[in-house]
Image: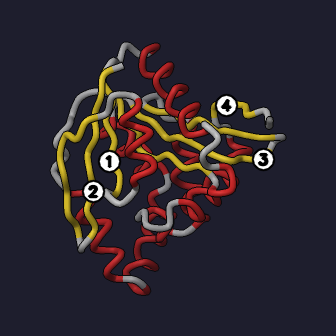
């Protein structure tokens, strides 16, 4: 059995996390902004953010999964988006010019009314497809739970595509229930929440 280690992301791991985000979460909006923005903008800013963390799963030094969490989503995202404004604007303009529908999808997701406003949020979770069904996602959620509990947070929520049955089942094993639904450009999302 392979030894999986979970640790906080540092600046040396940003590129690997950004690459996995682009590969494993292709339906997500952020990969549309490019790997450079994810690495040098979003994930670099996440390291310094007091409202959130990124935990990384590694096997023999190779990043095989990550989870991005926040204890105050609005503050966290405002800070992350605001850190590398020039890089973000360049990525958004490039996206608008090359993939306008994806651009408007991102705007719609950003403006959507979130049915859950309190608690900790699992912003993103991804496990390399070659390493799925080995308990790595569960280990990452457990690391998130420890972080939330240490911060005094006992309620968790997340958003995922309704078609993402495998991750929904994993969250349900933690007690997740549907808290709301969202439909944007033919994509259906579920908001899930649970107590820890």
Report how many numbered discs are placed on residues in the image.
Answer: 4
Nearest the eye: 159 or 91: 159
The C terminus - image quarter: top left
**What is the C-alpha distance between the residues marked 3 and 4?**
11 Å
Of callouts 3 and 1, the N-terminal one: 3
Toward which corner of the image does residue 48 lie, by quadrant?
top right
* Residue at position x 49%, y 22% in the image: 147
Q: CA distance from mark 1 to mark 2?
A: 7 Å
Residue that badge 1 annotates: 159
Q: Nearer the viewer, mark 3 or mark 2?
A: 2
| Real-space Cα separation, disc 3 to disc 1, in angstroms | 27 Å
Give the number of the disc on residue 6: 4
Task: Return the mark for residue 62.
Answer: 3
Please tell me which of labels 4 and 1 falls first in the chain.
Answer: 4
Q: Are marks 1 and 2 in contact (CB under 8 Å)?
A: yes
Task: Tell me if residue 116 comes above or below residue 109 in the rendering.
Answer: above
Q: Which residue is mark 2?
A: 189
Residue at (50, 60) in percent of width and height: 25
Q: Is residue 160 left or right of residue 87?
A: left
Answer with left or right where residue 191 lies relative to residue 20.
left
Residue occupying image coordinates x 46% and y 23%: 145
Labels 3 and 4 touching (C-beta < 8 A): no
Mark 4 and mark 2 in contact? Answer it, CB < 8 Å.
no
Image location of residue 68, percent across then percent down: 49, 41
Disc 2 secondary structure class: strand
């Amino acid at each position: 059995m392979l030894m999986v280690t979970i640790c906080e992301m540092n600046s040396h791991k940003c590129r690997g996390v950004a690459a996995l985000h682009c590969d494993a979460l292709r339906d997500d909006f952020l990969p549309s902004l490019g790997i450079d923005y994810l690495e040098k903008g979003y994930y670099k800013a996440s390291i310094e953010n007091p409202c959130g963390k990124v935990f990384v799963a590694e096997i023999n030094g190779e990043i095989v999964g990550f989870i991005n969490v926040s204890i105050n989503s609005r503050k966290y995202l405002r800070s992350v988006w605001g850190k590398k404004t020039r890089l973000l604007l360049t990525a958004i303009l490039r996206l608008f010019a090359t993939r306008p529908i994806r651009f408007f999808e991102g705007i719609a997701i950003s403006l959507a009314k979130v049915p859950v406003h309190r608690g900790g949020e699992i912003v993103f979770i991804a496990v390399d497809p070659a390493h799925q069904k080995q308990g790595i996602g569960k280990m990452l959620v457990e690391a998130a739970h420890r972080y939330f509990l240490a911060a005094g947070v006992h309620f968790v929520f997340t958003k995922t595509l309704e078609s993402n049955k495998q991750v929904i089942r994993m969250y349900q094993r933690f007690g997740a229930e549907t808290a709301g639904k969202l439909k944007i450009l033919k994509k259906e999302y579920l908001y899930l929440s649970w107590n820890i």
